[in-house]
Amino acid sequence: MEHIYSDYFNLTETITELKRDILGVVLHDDAENYTAKAYITWLKKRIDQDELEKGWASVYVDQTTCYWFHPTHYTEWHCGDKFANTHYIGIERCQSKINGVLNDNEFMKIEEVSFWLAAAILKKYHLPVNRTTVRIHKEFYNTACPARSWLIHLQNGLDTLESINKLKDYFIFKISQYYSDISKKDIEILG
Ligand SMILES: [Zn+2]
């Protein structure tokens, strides 16, 4: 896994203020074909065109790369919801477009990396793995996100609280498998 950090990790200037408190992570499906590395130029363009308000997350992940766009303890514009943006860390799972460049098995390999990453981030912030700390975008905003995993793991199930919890419980199960093995060294490389 290659970890790439944006200039925001060297600059004193950040896009946003510190988060009020860190309560957990939100797993997103980007609904695009872009790799994590492709987001480097994609986000630069967003900065150049003064369009950051359209949204961004702390970290973009695919099977080989983590692109850390902005330090995780700062507010993000990833949920379209003020409380979520100021309290949760966004993990953008790349190349999740339905009928896109990846088949389900390939996308599930990216999901696997995102579960490791979620475990590491939760451990870094001394948070447990449960329904309060592991969240999905849908809980905060009227969106299909995470649409790819909704299709794969729920067979496009009904948009109900029961479905949300079913998907979250799957994420929680997967993240828990990594949690205890996360080392200090793993945590040091997180953005
Ligand atoms: Zn999302």
Image (cartoon, grey):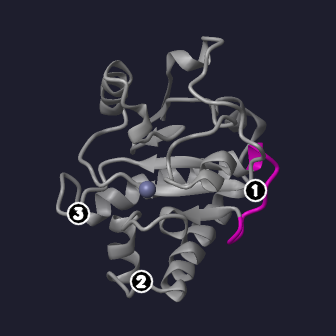
Q: Residue at x 43, y 37 (%)?
A: 53
Q: Name above or below for residue 48 compared with residue 70.
A: above
Question: What label does residue 15 carry, if any?
Answer: none
- Location of residue 169 by image quarter: bottom right
Q: Name above or below for residue 41 compared with residue 149.
A: above
Q: Nearer the viewer, mark 1 or mark 2?
A: 2
Q: Which residue is mark 2?
A: 159
Q: Quadrant of ligand 1?
A: bottom left
Q: Which residue is mark 3?
A: 98
Q: Main secondary structure of the magenta part?
A: loop
Q: Nearer the viewer, mark 1 or mark 3?
A: 3
Image quadrant holding the C terminus, namely top right
Q: Amino acid at mark 3?
A: Ile
In x, y percent, where is residue 36? Answer: 37, 36
Q: Is residue 126 magenta?
A: yes
Q: Amino acid at mark 2?
A: Asp
In x, y percent, where is residue 114? Answer: 51, 52
Between disc 1 and disc 2, whose residue precedes?
A: 2
- Which segment did they paint magenta? 123-132
* Residue 41 relative to residue 136: left or right: left
